[in-house]
Structures are given as C-alpha cells and as structure tokens.
Amino acid sequence: MYSIAIDGPSGSGKSTVAKAVAAKLGFLYVDTGAIYRTVGVFAKRNNIDPHDEETLGANLDKVDIKIRWIDGTQHVFLSDEDVSEEIRLPEMSMYASAVSALGKVRAFLLQMQRDFAKTNNVIMDGRDIGTVVLPDADVKIFMYATSEARAKRRYKELLEKGKEVTYEEVLSDMIERDKNDSSRALAPCKPAEDAIMMDNSEMSLEINIEKVLEIINEKINVAV
Ligand code: DC
C-alpha cells in the first residue's frame, strides 16, 4: 500500500489539494482534522471543557467515531449520527484545536488513522501525519502559506457557505489556532525532516495540484 502524508497549518489548502490528487490517483483521501473536530463536538455536546484532559479522557470510551465515504466524500459519524456539517462550524475549529493538544485524545485517535493506511492507498492530511501517524509514508509534503493568504482563502470559503464573518475575525482565529497547533508539546504542526516544503502563497490551485502530482510521480510509480 502507498501512503502520502500532507501536513500544514489551517488554510494552507492541503485538504482541497489532497482531495483532488486522491481522486486523480484513485487513492483514499483521509481528512484527519475531521476526527479531532468530531471529538470537539462530543466535548461541546457534553459540556466538557475541551482543555480538561482528565474529564475528556475519562469519557473517551463513549466517543464512537466512524468515517465513511459516501459518493467519494468523507463523512464523519458520532455514535452513528452524521456530524459532517456540524464539525465545520467556525466555533468547532477552536474546540478541535483545544482537544487536539491533549495526549489522551491523540493516543485515542492514532490507531484509527493508522488502520486506514494499512488497508488502502491513502492520502492523509493533518498536522502530524508525516511525523507521528505515518512516519514511513512514501511521500511527505508540508504545505504552507502566509497567514494573510490562508485567511483570505478561508474567508472566501466561509462567505461562499453563507457564513457571516469578517476577514479580521478569520485572520485572528487563524493566528490563534496556528499558535495553539504549532506550540503544543505533543505532535505539534511541523514538517517531518524528510518532508518536501511547499509554499503556495502565490500558487493557483491548479498549479499546486500539478506540483504535488509531480512530486508523487517522482517518488512512487503511480501513473496518472
Ligand atoms: O485540519 P483542521 O483545521 O480540520 O483540523 C482541526 C484541528 O485539529 C486543528 O486545529 C489541529 C488538529 N489536528 C491535529 O492536531 N492533528 C491532525 N492530524 C489534524 C488536525
């Protein structure tokens, strides 16, 4: 099985690129942020402070997460309820970021992520795929862009979905989340030593996809 790890901060475009590349290659696309977001939904619904490792840790046995692919799109289920829409609410980003800093949560989700790569050719995106989840991935790419470029993209995306936000809110959320995700002690968002760095601040989506496919083709023999 082949595995491709794409890591990077929020808004770096990794999900959009990974999804498109997975479709071209016929690989399974796994968005690992979605499962951290689902734990965030669980915490919120159960009135658990997302920073409270003891309480959340003691309740993880009740967190039943499943990922299913419906018409090629990843859906996440919490106790068999499809929460794919709810996890995208802007407030869930902060919940996800908070729970993702907890060791018990990370340990709980690790095997689930590795299992996908055991039985499928995968493109997995996240923060620690190349460093922790799949350290032996065949291809590792770290995608990044300036915070302004990333906030602009996220802002556009939210407007298109009809969400009422300002660019300033999106930018400050992004900066705060970057700080949380890259400064945490456990599996911080950072490139693996053998990752290929890709700054896409000035890159169109089409070129970005093309470049990722080129890198993959150089490393593994998967004809597109
Ligand atoms: O990619 P995303 O924005 O949906 O991720 C939500 C949060 O989950 C993000 O703030 C950091 C965390 N996360 C993580 O710690 N490790 C991953 N592999 C994926 C996401």
Image: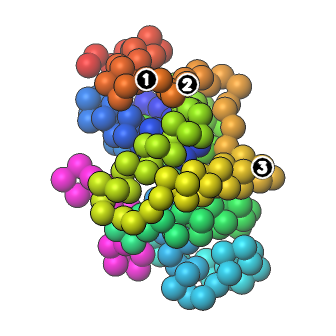
Q: Residue at x 72, y 65 (%)?
A: 102
**For this view, does 189 lie left or right of residue 205?**
right
Residue 148 visible within the image: yes
Label 1 or label 3, whichever lies nearer to me, is 1
Dot 2 and dot 1 residues touching (CB under 8 Å)? yes
Label 1 packing within 10 angstroms: few (<14), some (14-19), many (20+): few
Residue 164, how many percent across, how many down? 39, 66
The secondary structure type at the circle numbered 1 is: loop
Residue to which mark 3 is pinned:
183
Label 2 packing within 10 angstroms: few (<14), some (14-19), many (20+): few
**For this view, does 152 lie left or right of residue 36?**
left
**Residue 109 position (above or below residue 38):** above
Q: What residue type is labelled 2?
A: Asp
Q: Residue furthest left?
A: 71
Nearer the observer, 112 or 25: 25
Q: Is residue 71 magenta?
A: yes
Nearer the observer, 155 or 215: 155
Q: Residue at x 59, y 40 (%)?
A: 147
Where are the magenta residues, as a range?
Answer: 67-83
Q: Is residue 154 magenta?
A: no
Residue 128, how many percent across, how many down? 63, 44
**Residue 109 position (above or below residue 140):** below
Residue 173, how many percent across, how many down? 60, 57
**Residue 193 position (above or below residue 157):** above
How far is the residue under mark 1 from the one under mark 3?
27 Å
Q: Does the residue labelled 2 lie within 8 Å of ligand 1?
A: no
Residue 188 visible within the image: no
The circle on residue 203 is: 1
Q: What residue type is labelled 1?
A: Met
How far is the residue under mark 2 from the one under mark 3?
20 Å
Q: Which residue is drawn at 35% across and 29% down?
A: 205
The circle on residue 199 is: 2
